Image (spheres, rainbow, N blue to C red):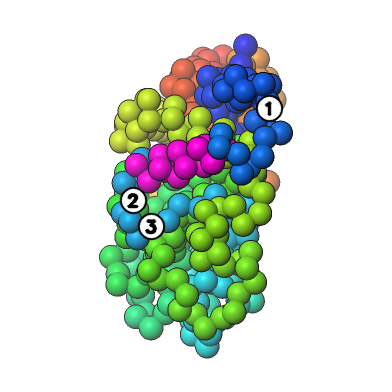
Amino acid sequence: MKKFNFSAGPSTLPEEVLQQASEAILDLNKSGLSLIEISHRSKDFIAIMDESRALVKKLMKLDDDHEVLFLQGGASLQFLMAPLNFLKKGSKAAYIDSGNFASASIKEAKKIGFIDVLASSKEANYTYIPKNYEIPLDVDYLHLTSNNTVYGTEMHDFPETSVPLVCDMSSDILSKELNFNKFALIYAGAQKNIGPAGVTLVIVNKTLLGKTGRDLPSYLDYQVHISKESMANTPPVFAIYTTLLNLKWLEKQGGVSAAAERNKIKADLLYGEVDRNPLFRGVCEKVDRSLMNVCFFLNDEEKLKEKFDKMWKDSNIVGIGGYRSVGGYRASIYNAMPLEGVQTLVNVMKELEKTA
Ligand SMILES: *Cc1c(COP(=O)(O)O)cnc(C)c1O
């Protein structure tokens, strides 16, 4: 039986997607060829790429200014590509430090230009989303991290500003409806909420490109990837195809709005238990809680950790250990985590209360 995989990333994918992906490894579309041995220039693969791009545009309701790219190097390479493509020579950009990945993006950007960190929640071990900061109007963009995977906080509102917004949406993209067209750049490593590791979804407003005065290396230039339709080099065909299968699954389940409703129900169920059960407590400010990564502590770890850990492991659950800098537990409940998985975890928490 497939386990309930609460890992933060790589993370769970629907069983039917895994089934279809494994069939394509053996024989793609009854062609007698494996998905991973066909040419990326073949008709079959170009159709996969075109369909993937079109489906992202449809699910996210993107306008024609926004281009969809499938790149490599993870969200981590985007920490560097964002400033290279959007930060003008001699100018500055604003960042919000809301977690370890936000902090990593700042570190990279500082190598490219002047970075103004407007706000940080580091002093509180990133247990809340910084708010009420002043956004200077002379910055080239404001960089945000919409969901802080490690700490379990999520931006439920975005600042209203004329400054171009750049957002790392690695762990909550496609989990809820947003006006994605208001962003200059969105990027997301696929392995949280989109598909397998190996591909990064990048959505860029092409009308804002080519204005930095930099002569970029080709591979780091979004305009090159746009003109080559994400095939500047051999694309990760397996990761892209599996992503397409997963996006089709999402569409069949009712698209982003239906996913958002399911995600709310799952998160309410789990946070409800964390708040109700006297053995547990939440980690983050309630208003900033992530609907994707639910972080919680056992109040009496010394007495109950061993018992609780055995109970959830015996219940077909994997991957709820917290990140090393936070400790406790983290249950990642992305789009593909079924309600049944969350209910199983909640039942274990209730059972612990009864037997503790
Ligand atoms: C996982 C994650 C990253 C890092 O992604 P890679 O694809 O491994 O580079 C960056 N930002 C956020 C918010 C993440 O969750």
Classify the position of the C terminus by image quarter.
Answer: top right
Q: CA distance from mark 2 to mark 1?
A: 32 Å
Mark 1 closeness class: few <14, some 14–19, many ≥20 residues within 10 Å: some
**Residue ID at (49%, 80%):** 212
Residue occupying image coordinates x 33% and y 51%? 62
- Pointer 2 with pointer 3, Cβ within 8 A: yes
**Percent coordinates x, y for residue 265 in the rendering:** 35, 28
The magenta-colored residue range is 45-58
Kindly identify which residue carries mark 1: 34
Q: Residue at x 45, y 34 (%)?
A: 247
Q: Quadrant of the N terminus?
A: top right
Instruction: List the residue tagged with mark 2.
Output: 62
Residue in the picture at 35% in, 60% down: 65
Q: Earlier in the sequence, mark 1 or mark 3?
A: 1
Q: Secondary structure at mark 1?
A: loop
- Residue extending furthest toward the top: 1
Q: Amino acid at mark 1?
A: Ser
Q: Which mark is residue 66?
A: 3
Q: Does residue 248 appear in the picture of this structure? A: yes
